[in-house]
Structure formats: C-alpha cells, structure tokens
Image (cartoon, rainbow, N blue to C red):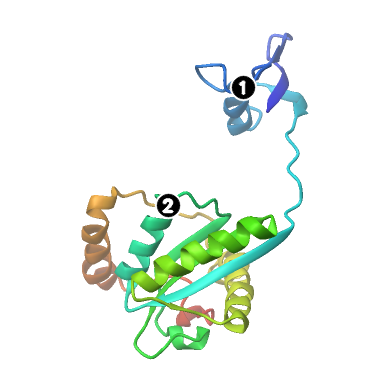
Amino acid sequence: MSLEVALSGGRTLRTGPKVLYTSTGIGLHHLFVGAEGTLGIVTEATLRVEPYPETRDMVLAFFDDFWKANEAAQRLMSSCVTFTGGEAYEAEDASVHGAPEGMNGLFYVGLDGTRGEVDAEREYISRMIRKLDGVIADEAHTRAFMDRYTEQWCGARVATRFEDVLTTYVPMDRIREFYDRLWSDVMKRHGIRPIPGERYGLD
C-alpha cells in the first residue's frame, strides 16, 4: 500500500496516500516496486493483509474449439465475477482431461472466498458455460487437470531450456487474425509448435 524509500541522494521518501481512493496521479509505490531497486532502496513497506479464503474451487469446461472457449473467457471478464485466474486454450487431445470426443477447446477459472460467494459464482459460470454449449468437467478430472497444468508451467522452462518468455498483446477485434496467421503461416514456416506439447512430453 505504501513504501519508505531511500533515494540516491540520501533522502527518504514515503509513498502512498493516507486515505485510500481519494488521491489522483501516479502510484509511486507501484513505480518503485516495478523498478526493482533502480530508483531507490525500499527500507519499509506497508502491506494490506487479506484473510485466507474460506473455500476454493475451480471450474473446467470443454467447448468445440478455442473460439467458443475464448468467448466464455471474454464473457467472464466482462461479468461481475471475481476470480483468481483462468485461461482459454485449445488442446491437441482434450479427452485426456475428460472432454467429450471432438471437444478440444478448454476453459478454466479459479475461485476463492466465502462458501456463499464461491457457490454463487460457480453457479453463474456454470449457467454461462451451458448457454454456450459447453460441457463442465467432473470434479476428479478438474483436480487432475489443475495438478497437471501446474506441473507443466512450473517445469516448462526447465524442459525447454528457454530463459526468456515472449507474451503478445493483441486487440480483441484482431485476435482471430493473429492466431490464424500464427498457426497457418508463422509456425509452419519456422517449424515450431506451442509449448507445452508432445515434443517435450508435457501434453
């Protein structure tokens, strides 16, 4: 929420408003944290403590393809649901995660909070998925998927020996154009494939 920072000239600076939501302008504490010590040395930090969630849950759903899964993700982001993380993507073979035959679009979302909040949000998301003709995975497949997914992303850099990660940001109205070019042109031309994938035994 705020920092005490020692500047290069020897002065100290206290960042952060005394009253939340009443100040305008740059949040200097975010600037100093993002600079990782290049603008000043953090000597004290004031943190906001969040209670440990009463319960956690996750929803995993399958769709015919990536674009249907992506539509679910976009609807979720424009909704009132507060979620801890989520993603839409397409698997080479989603049946290993319990998907019905031919449904390779995956969408998952993590939830936490009080039992009432999580139950209400899960029900909202489930209704949204069914309206988009998605199929919700059972609990066993959902838990196995999350365990596997965590292993993949924790071990992907070790398995591939990549030190740098490139993240692309594309306007939503051009995302289909981006992926069509990536899959049908760029990847074929350079002989590359997405990771994790079968090549690295991480599918």
Q: Amino acid at mark 1?
A: Leu
- Camera-nearest residue between 196 and 73: 73
Badge 1: residue crowd in 10 Å (few <14, some 14–19, many ≥20): some
Q: Position of residue 100 (x, y in %)?
A: 41, 88
User: Can you say whether 79 is above or below 125 in the image?
Assistant: above
Describe residue 127's horizontal placement relative to residue 161 as left or right: left
Residue corresponding to mark 2: 77
Describe residue 135's horizontal placement relative to residue 153 as left or right: left
Q: Residue at x 46, y 77 (%)?
A: 197
Badge 2: residue crowd in 10 Å (few <14, some 14–19, many ≥20): few
Q: Secondary structure at mark 1?
A: loop
Observer able to see residue 73: yes
Q: Quadrant of residue 16?
A: top right
User: Can you say whether 198 is above or below 28 in the image?
Assistant: below
User: Can you say whether 102 is above or below 50 in the image?
Assistant: below
User: Can you say whether 129 is above or below 169 in the image?
Assistant: below
Q: Quadrant of residue 20?
A: top right
Q: Residue at x 51, y 80 (%)?
A: 137
Q: How many numbered callouts?
A: 2
Which is more N-terminal, label 1 or label 2?
1
Q: Quadrant of residue 138?
A: bottom right
Residue corresponding to mark 1: 39
Q: Residue at x 54, y 59 (%)?
A: 121
Rounded to the nearest angstrom, the CA distance separating label 2 from label 1 is 34 Å
Q: Residue at x 23, y 66 (%)?
A: 180
